[in-house]
Image (cartoon, grey):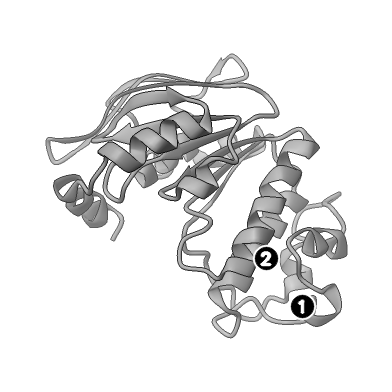
Amino acid sequence: MLELKDIHYSVERKEILRGINLVMGEGKIHSIIGVNGTGKTTLAAVLMGLNGYKPSRGEVLFNGKNITNFPTTERAKLGITLAWQIPANFEGITVREYLSIKKNSVEPKKALKLVGLNPDLYLDRTVDENLSGGERKRIELASVFSIKPKLVILDEPDSGIDMASISAIKKMIRSFKKMGASVLLITHSERMARIGDSVALLCNGKIVKEGNGKEVTEFFRKHCKECDHIGEIEEEILK
């Protein structure tokens, strides 16, 4: 379904992605694990085609089609979607409206139940700062599920939230797979990464190891540390 061929990305002469090669199968969960500052969020932005995130070299293929130069809107039409680490707030929009934006979407009550939220308590609430971080992330995942995507890119979905929300998020990730969607799960958590059918370790802008969850996460635990110099660059370009 998704193939990355020698993806490079640079900013201000600093190379952040340094030759990423990756193949994802249809209906699979593929985890990318790495410490903060290794290029994970930059990779998500490149895959989604966000403004300014065009590879300096390499190709992005989706279902055999070269989408390297496609804008974000065209990638979305193909069924690619991205859920950020920090979801946006939407003042004045209810959860019901948020989950019903697209025609023929999954019924809002069903989507909320899949992320462990009671529809009677949440459908008429506003998508704003009054929701906790865990609630907001669950609702965003419910919205992604409701549009029936083909490829879901999840950027640190477990970051900074409670254990109950993490359990619900894991359940939803598996629900994407049951739906037939592919999931690219970006995380720094070993437990979360092990949900993947396969796991890749990203270090200093390169994939240095791929394999099953146990093998890769154990290598990650023993050998990886923070890459502050890359982290500073990523922080700067995401301001």
The crowd level at tag 2 (other Cα within 10 Å; few <14, some 14-19, many 20+) is many
Q: Residue at x 78, y 64 (%)?
A: 112
Tell which of 192 and 74 is nearer to you.
192
Secondary structure of the residue carrying tag 1 is helix
* Tag 2–tag 1 contact (CB < 8 Å): yes
Residue 184 rendering spot, x and y as whole percentages: 55, 37
The residue singled out by tag 1 in the image is 122
Is residue 49 visible in the rendered image? The answer is no
> Which quarter of the picture shows residue 2?
top right
Quadrant where the N terminus sits is top right
Compute the Cα span from label 2 to label 1: 9 Å
Would residue 70 be found to the left or right of residue 105 on screen?
Answer: left
What's under tag 1, amino acid-wise? Tyr
Q: Residue at x 30, y 51 (%)?
A: 36
The residue singled out by tag 2 in the image is 139
Secondary structure of the residue carrying tag 2 is helix
Q: Residue at x 47, y 44 (%)?
A: 186
What's under tag 2, amino acid-wise? Ile
Residue 53 rendering spot, x and y as whole percentages: 35, 39
Number of marks in the rendered image = 2
Is residue 4 visible in the rendered image? The answer is yes
Q: Residue furthest bottom?
A: 130
The crowd level at tag 1 (other Cα within 10 Å; few <14, some 14-19, many 20+) is some
Q: Is residue 2 above or below residue 34?
A: above
Q: Is residue 193 above or below residue 99?
A: above
Tell which of 121 and 236 is nearer to you.
121
Residue 148 rendering spot, x and y as whole percentages: 76, 43
Would residue 178 be found to the left or right of residue 224 on screen?
Answer: right
